[in-house]
Amino acid sequence: SSDLFHWHMALSKDGLLGKLTEWKIAHQTIEHALSPTCEIHSQNIKGTAFESFIGNGQAKNLFFKVPSGGGPLKNRLFLVCALVETAVDNKVLSARLGIKPSAPLRFAADDVFDDVLQIPKGSVNPFVMAQASCNEVTLLLDKKFLDCKGLLFHPMQSDFTTLLSPDQLTAFLEKAAPGRYMYVDLASEEKIDLPTVAAPAPSQSKPKGGKAEQKEQPAIVASTVSDDVSTWHSAPYKTAMGWTL
């Protein structure tokens, strides 16, 4: 997509992978064709080191906003990350959060998506929580993630996939978004008690530029996936085809 070439993200793929390494988050990353949907992603990782995680660690990501008539949580933003096979019912989830039935969770408008997530559609992932623009987002994670050996997420662009264990995902979020995420049983209908977070503040203009990118490191191709999670460190890949994202 031409959008991919012109996108300026607050956190790039190389910046993210550098952060994972800096924080000692065990991970592996592979490159493949653009994969904006779960179906295409499954096709594109067949025959790779990550093939065994197809349907067993792949995630979908849904970005919701509470309408202004939703009650106490009005205008709050929620990113829901779940296994592909987990059903996510926005009305059931709304009821569990105490949102008025007349104004349930809705997909965030394009301008909110762009301003907050700052990432192309088809590339959404929980790593966005490290961006300052996502400071008012609450991340709800599928509790079934905790039963998986490994989880697959796009590292800010959909032509790469990063593998990490549930424990390592939690370690990342503790660094990036403490108090702004929780694991939820999405099959339940019990009330969800959200982490205590500040009410959304008025939008402020985002600073131009940002931190300097970390120096690019050479590509390392993951040919196999070790059972030892501690070996899942890999240097960030060089940007595909010279794209500067």
Image (cartoon, rainbow, N blue to C red):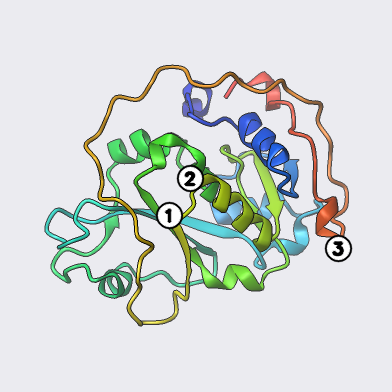
Q: Is residue 227 left or right of residue 160?
A: right
Task: Identify the disc placed on residue 129.
Answer: 2
Nearer-the-camera pick, 40 or 191: 191
Task: Identify the disc placed on residue 227.
Answer: 3
Question: Marks 2 and 3, Cα distance to the nearest angstrom?
Answer: 28 Å
Please, what secondary structure does the residue beneath circle 2 have? helix
Q: Residue at x 34, y 54 (%)?
A: 197
Disc on the earlier residue, 1 or 2? 2
Q: Residue at x 34, y 46 (%)?
A: 136
Disc on the earlier residue, 2 or 3? 2
Count neighbours of disc 1 (C-alpha within 10 A) and say few if under 14, some if 14 to 19, many if 20 or more.
many
> Disc 3 marks which amino acid?
Asp
Count neighbours of disc 2 (C-alpha within 10 A) and say few if under 14, some if 14 to 19, many if 20 or more.
many
The answer to whether residue 69 is above or below residue 233 is below
Please, what secondary structure does the residue beneath circle 1 have? loop
Count neighbours of disc 3 (C-alpha within 10 A) and say few if under 14, some if 14 to 19, many if 20 or more.
few
Query: Visible in this render: residue 122?
Result: no
> Disc 1 marks which amino acid?
Arg
Provide the residue designation for mark 1. Answer: 180
Question: Marks 1 and 3, Cα distance to the nearest angstrom?
Answer: 30 Å
The answer to whether residue 209 is above or below residue 144 is above
Q: Within the image, what quadrant is residue 89 found in?
A: bottom left
